Image (tube, rainbow, N blue to C red):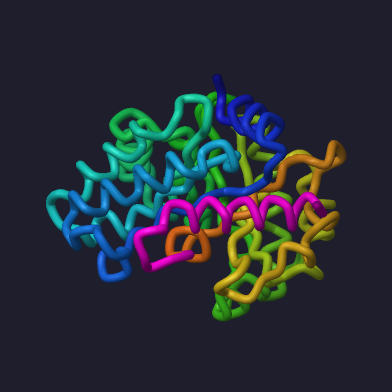
Amino acid sequence: MSFREKYLAAATRGRTKVCVGLDPDIQKLPEGIEKTPEGVGRFLCEIIDATHDLACVFKPNFAFFGALGQDGIGVLREIIGHIPNDVPTILDFKAGDIGNTAEKYAEMAYDVLQTDAVTVNPYMGFDAVEPFLRGKERCVFLLCLTSNPGSADFQRLETADGPLFEVVARTAHLWSGQGDCGLVVGATHPDDLPRVRQLAPTLPFLIPGVGSQGGSAADILGQAGDSYGQGVLINASRGILYASSGHDYADAARKAAEELRNAIEGN
């Protein structure tokens, strides 16, 4: 199945638009979990088991696994392999480099780690993105209007064709003819979501920034969905992973994911 097919099936099955971000900070592991790479693997596998039916996608963040040292890639492969086959994964590593390097990034993500999608920085242009475009099988989420405060430093710069983030959205829509594309658009920019959706009417949006970064699920309801009310993946990482520091961490993570799903769905 392609990324899009997996995502839509999981979203429909679980009535969910929740993307569970897997950002393991070894210092934040709850009681009863060893602060080791093996402990991280155990912790994340239990989080996955507790939330997989509430998630339309899981998003492991490459940096947090790299910070574990030489065992980090092994843990990343372990948890990707633990995710049920009918729930897709997005490797969040915001790659962006010249063509031959981008080819190796794509090889690592798709062929070695077996992820269904990636996040990519489009700043270096099409030749840096092209290796990630593999028809409709995979999906490339391009950074468009990110949730961090510094996003305005470049993403809102005016060009002859409008703000830079609008150029990215328009261009990604064109590139989607050569492979499945999506956009990263932060929940901290609710007023801009309708415009981005107008420029990219068919692309899925990965929306970070809910919860710990101040974004609200209520603020983005109805603003980012495509014409079918789909195409929205609302990411939550810390609010789910670290919902409890006690032995009930898995149950607390499930409760947090369920509460977010219900808030999105208006239940």
Using the image as rendered, state which of residue 232 and residue 105 is in the foreground. Answer: 232
- Does residue 10 show up magenta in the picture? no
Residue 192 higher or lower than 106, as above or below: below
156, 247: nearer the viewer: 247
Q: Nearer the viewer, residue 195 or 148?
A: 148
Read off the magenta span.
Answer: 243-267
Q: Position of residue 242 (x, y in %)?
A: 43, 64
Taking the view exactly as shown, the residue that stands out farthest to the left is: 70
Q: Quadrant of residue 29?
A: bottom left
Q: Residue furthest front?
A: 247
Q: Is residue 249 magenta?
A: yes
Rendered residue at 73%/52% (across/down): 262
| Residue that appears at 30% across and 37% down | 108
Q: In the image, what residue occupies the spot 22% across and 53% down?
A: 39
Give how far across and how far down residue 52 sits, in percent.
Answer: 51, 38
Quick check: 135 left or right of 101? right
**Most foreground residue, 67 or 165:** 67
